[in-house]
Image: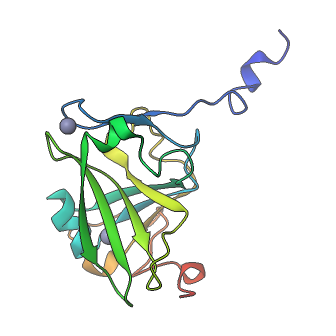
Amino acid sequence: MAGHGTETDTEAKPLAVRCQCGNASFPTPTAKPKILFYCHCTECQKQTSSAFGTSAIYTSDGLLPLSPDLAGRMKVFHRQTEKGRSMECYFCSECGSRMFHRIISADGKPRNTVSIKGGCIEGLEWNWSGSMHIFMRSAVIDIPAEFEQYETLPPWMKMD
Ligand SMILES: [Zn+2]
Ligand SMILES: [Zn+2]
């Protein structure tokens, strides 16, 4: 019994990811994302039809390859990105909610992470310390200075 209230982290459970209509759902691969981006790039503005996109980065283990059931409920939109890379964009085949993305390297190898769209993650902790605003050069709203933010990507991400 002692210390029960401090065990929250070790007992943290995956969260439910659900599209707008409920046709497609799956648990997050881990309880917490590795990092959470608020992305103000113009692609994310188009993708979300909104001011910015949200991407919670998780391992792809356990989600991809999709189970046959989930594969029957989702479709994939492919788009080219920069430097020969491409992106697989998974969305609900009924309501069209974008649910997650995976980057494919120029050599055809998929990354071992996925970017799950924050608005689909039920109970996501939005303001945790691992969140940051990126691609602020194309932001259409001001973000208060106390939030971590970058014109493009943080320097440690610019390796390739
Ligand atoms: Zn749906
Ligand atoms: Zn973006």
**Residue at the image point whose x is 34% and y is 71% from the top:** 87
Taking depth in this image into account, of 43 and 18 the one nearest to the observer is 18
Taking depth in this image into account, of 38 and 69 the one nearest to the observer is 69
Place of residue 68 in the rendered image (x, y in percent of width and height, measured from the top left): 37, 40
Relative to 141, is 86 on the left or the right? right
**Residue at the image point whose x is 37% and y is 48% from the top:** 118
Ligand 2 occupies quarter: bottom left
Place of residue 144 in the rendered image (x, y in percent of width and height, measured from the top left): 38, 63
Q: Which residue ends up furthest to the front in the rendered image? A: 68
In the image, residue 140 sits, relative to residue 125, either above or below, namely below
Q: Which picture quadrant has residue 46?
A: bottom left
Place of residue 124 in the rendered image (x, y in percent of width and height, measured from the top left): 45, 39
Q: Which picture quadrant has residue 6?
A: top right
**Residue at the image point whose x is 45% and y is 71% from the top:** 149
Q: Is residue 8 visible?
A: yes
Taking depth in this image into account, of 82 and 44 the one nearest to the observer is 82
Relative to 138, is 135 on the left or the right? right
Q: Which picture quadrant has residue 16?
A: top left
